[in-house]
Image (spheres, rainbow, N blue to C red):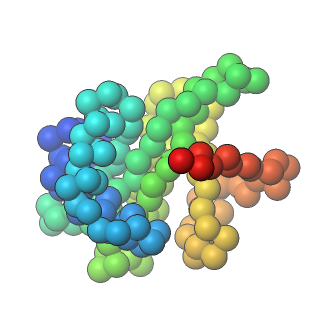
Amino acid sequence: MIKQATVLDVDLIAPLFDAYRVFYGQESDVEAAKDFLLERFRKGENVIFLALENEIPVGFTQLYATFSSVSMQQFYILNDLFVAPKARKKGVGEQLLNHAKDFCQLKNGKGLALETATDNPAQKLYERLGWEKDEAYLHYFWKNPQ
């Protein structure tokens, strides 16, 4: 089952969010993860879809709204997608991605954007679900040295 999470679900999401961050090389800190998520919910800055299997959290995706000045439309950044190892290969990631697409359509958004590591095997899933690799633009990032 996939549900749109609320601030009341933070205790369910935080361990998954922490595991996601650890997957990307960060130190585990469930309390900091919880605080981060609470802040996003309190400020209305995110949309999270939570996957539950027998009422146990097994995955999530987190979206952030942004805008395209050129098209003058809102779109969403699919910033985070994580499925617990025990729930992989069961279609959970696909369900989460499809829920995000349905949400975007419901909100009449321009689309969804995501970025992923070049060696992430989920690329096959993205492409199978109609996501297109952007080969027309380069993406740059400036990192604050402080």
Quick one: quadrant of the N terminus?
bottom left
Side of 14 relative to 135 (left or right): left
- Does residue 17 appear in the picture of this structure? yes
Side of 125 relative to 59 (left or right): right
| Residue 119 percent across, percent down from the top left | 63, 76
Write the residue at 22% across / 60% down.
30
Write the residue at 50% across / 50% down.
79
Q: Nearer the viewer, residue 128 or 80?
A: 80
- Does residue 13 appear in the picture of this structure? no
| Residue 102 percent across, percent down from the top left | 47, 41
Residue at the extreme top of the image, as rendered: 72
Residue 125's place in the image compared with 4, above or below, is below
Write the residue at 85% across / 49% down.
136
Q: Nearer the viewer, residue 140 or 75?
A: 140
Side of 55 relative to 2 (left or right): left
Residue at the extreme right of the image, as rendered: 136
Write the residue at 28% across / 54% down.
33
